[in-house]
Every structure is written in C-alpha cells, then in structure tokens.
Image: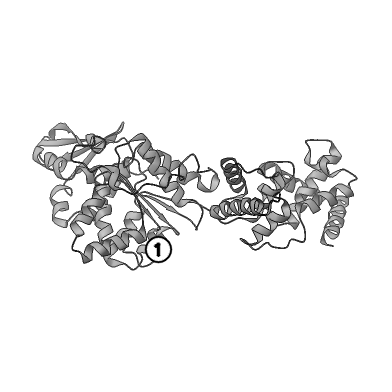
Amino acid sequence: MTITLQQQWAQCQTILADNLTSSAYQTWFAPIVPLQFAEGVLVLQVKSQFVAEYIEENYIPLLSSAILRVFGAGTRLEYRVLIDAASGAGTMVPSAGSAAKEQWTAAPQNRPSNADLPKLNELYTFDSFIAGEPNKLARTAGLAISKQPGYTAFNPLFIYGGSGVGKTHLACAIGHQTQALYPQARVLYVSANTFKLQFQAARQENRIPDFLNFYQSVDVLIVDDIQYFSGLKGTQDTFFHIFNYLQQSRKQLILTCDRPPVELKDIEERLLTRFKWGLSAEITRPDYDLRRNILLSKMRRDGIVLSDEIVDFIAMNVRDSVRDLEGILASLLAHSTLTDKEIDLALTEQVVSHVVALQPQTTTVDDVINTVAQHYNLPPKALLAQNRSKDVSLARHVAVYLCKQLTDRSLTEIGYRMGRRTHATVLHSIAYVRDMMEEDAVLRQHIAQLQSALHH
C-alpha cells in the first residue's frame, strides 16, 4: 500500500504533538499544510513569514528530527508562505535547518572538552568486532551511525540480545569510530546503573541542573543495560528529558538492553515509545560460523595455536556467549603454561566442561562418517573429498542425511565437518536422500541398516 504525503505528514505531526505542549503544537504546527515531496524536498505551506522564522528559530531541531524519521535522511525542507488565500499565491522560503548538521562539529570555544568524559573500552572497536549473520543488522546500522551520528534514521539505535553476545562491544565500537571521524565529538558511555547512582547523588546534593547540563553537552550518548531503569520513576523522568533534548538537537543515542522494548516492564510508556523511534536491532546468539571466526580472531590476537579439532570442539560446544569463548581460550593458555603441557583435546574437554554442560552424544558426525564409509567400502576421507563419482556421491549424501537425523549438529556444522561444504549443499543432500528413499526400496533398507548400526 502506497502511503500518501498527507499520511506521512500526519506521522510527523504525531511526533511533534508528543514533544510539545498542546498550545505550542496547535499554534505553530497544526495549521501547516503539506504541499509536495519530490526529489528529496518537502514543501510545507505556512500562514506567514513570521511563522516560518519562528519555527526555524525555536523548533527546527524537533521538526528536522521528525522529517528525518518519516521522510528519510537527506530530506530538505522548504516553506511556502501563503500571500493571498483567495488566489493561492505564495512565495518559497528555504529552511536553514539543514545547517544544523554541522552545529556540533564546529567545536566552539566554550564547548566542554572530551577530557571530562570516561574513556571507552580500548578493546571494543570495529576491528575486533567479528561480523556474522547474528549481528549483521546491528553492525551495519552502527557503521552508518558513526559516519553521520544523529543524522540517520537509526536514532536511537536500540541494540538488544542475551548476555555476552556483543552488545556493549558494538556500542563502544560505534563510539570509537565516531571519535575517529569527528575527533571533537563528545562520546559518553555509561551503564544504566551508573546513570542511576549519578542521578541519585545529584538529587541529594541539589545538583540536578549540573547533571542535566553535563548529559546535554554530549554528542553521542551510549547507555548500557537500559533494562535496569525498570521501576525507577525519578531516573526515568530525568532520562526522558535528556533523551528529548539530545534527540531534538540531532545528537545520537545508543541504547543496549537484554530484551526488545515491547518486553520491558515498569518503564514509562512515553520512554518506550521513544525507544521504538529509531531502529531496534537484535544480536542473537553466535552461530557456529561466527563462534569459530571469533575463536580464530582471538587466537591470532593472543598468539595461540590450536588444532582444527580443538577449535571445532570449542565452537560446537560453547554456544551462548562470546565471553565464554574468550574465557575458555584464557583458561587453556593458563593451564598449558602452569602445567607445561601442550593444549590437546583432553585438556580442552576438561576446561570446556567447567564452563558449559557437555551433553553426552550417542552419535557423532565422525561416527556417521566412519559407519557409512565402512558400509559402502570406502575410506572415510573419500566422503570429505571433492570426488564426484556416483558411489562416493551417494555415500556422502547418505552421511549428510544421517548426520541431520541422528546428531544435534546444525546444518552449518554438518557441512563444515563433511569437508567444509556449504549450508545449501547440505540441504541439497538431505532433500536428495529423502526423494530417493520414496522410490528406492534398496536405499531405504540401507538407511535402516545404518541407523540400526549407529544406535548400537
């Protein structure tokens, strides 16, 4: 369904009404008529030159933010001042609001320096943030934000996901990248708990104006674990005013949370509404490919050499948290150094078992490979090679099919163990065997024999 200009402007009006007093909204924005949106230019009709000038002087950050959110980045604003209501004659007045984009990059003399801000974690950069499907959307948005903080549709950026998936790392990486591109930008990272304690101290010491001034002076505000604002009315009220000021001033907000906005409890509705204004991007648990790439990256960084077998074992068993992967590598290195022993699979299993519960598997991928190879009188390596002869291909298809049926490994993991084959190739093998079994009684019998052998 195509949205009309009137509907788009109605969305802008909703944002404006939500952030203004009723009298201010009715006086300055309710009478505006949207005339045209073409080639990136939005034309709004106002009653007089005075109305246009007043809006430009007092409300342009809020109006620009609303237009950005609804019409997209790069939209330019022009006013059409109505001169003669009877004839409809008018004159065009361009908005100077676009110049506001450079307002904080100029670093005026009276602007606070970055020296009074806590430093971002030096390890949390985009260089050390390993990209993968579970974090693709959030990472892409973060890169866009760092190039134009406050001037993308991702304001706020609400990053959510479970513990240890990389939310804080990504948020800080955006901050680092912004500072690299705009050295004068004031980037502040603060945990929700620290914000709460600072607010409580400011309230007890009657320093709320100073507290507000400090937070309103930043260009990029990163608040980690926003869920800890739950039930804190005073903290929420104060953050609401800071959020509004920064958002209307085209400053960037980045929030992290352990759940999406819709699942937050005891958070004021007006705050929840604002959390949803920009982009809510989930970072899910790292998949096998991402876990393996994270391990390899950290091994290179720390100078650790592990066999593919050990890397595979860790990546397949430590599934929930990037922090757990880091902890296991550190533990392996410590055990090896203190005991003067080589890091082998036995030591790895011991260390991993202290972090995650290793589930006993009655059937492994190796079991399937060896059993199928023996059944078809082939060496196991033949199933992993690129040999495309009819007999080897059939055995390989069967092995992939049984891996899916009898193990708890993902399709990606199965593909990797079966000679580094792709997800699509694994799906093809499974579908091929299923189709063949419907027509081939001998193949059905072989599959049944193999399943029986693998269950014993």
Res. 80 image quadrant: top left
Is 174 rendered above or below residue 283?
above
In which quadrant will I find the N terminus?
A: top left
Counting from the top left corner in percent of width and height, residue 386 is at: 78, 35
Residue 77 visible in the shown view: no
In the picture, measured across the screen, residue 323 lies left or right of residue 247, that is right
Q: How crowded is mark 1: few (under 14 residues within 10 Å), some or many (20 or more)?
A: some
Q: Which residue is more in the foreground, 128 or 2?
A: 128
Tag 1: amino acid: Leu
- Quadrant assignment, res 349: bottom right
Q: Write down the residue under mark 1.
A: 264
Classify residue 414 as left or right of residue 13. right
Q: In which quarter of the image is residue 354?
A: bottom right
User: The C terminus appears in which quarter of the rendering?
Assistant: bottom right
Q: Where is residue 314 in the image (x, y as percent from the top left)?
A: 65, 52
Is residue 306 found left or right of 20 in the rendered image?
Answer: right
Q: Nearer the viewer, residue 227 or 428?
A: 227
Q: Residue 52 location, x and y as percent?
A: 14, 39
- Residue 268 seen by the camera: yes
Circle 1: element type: loop
Q: x, y percentage for residue 416? A: 70, 44
Taking the image as shown, residue 136 lies to the left or right of residue 360, namely: left
Q: Which residue is drawn at 63% across and 44% down?
A: 304
Q: Closest to the observer: 109 or 397? A: 109
Q: Which residue appears at 16% of the width and 40% of the height? A: 56
Residue at image x 12%, y 37%?
Answer: 82
Q: Which colour scheme is used?
A: one colour
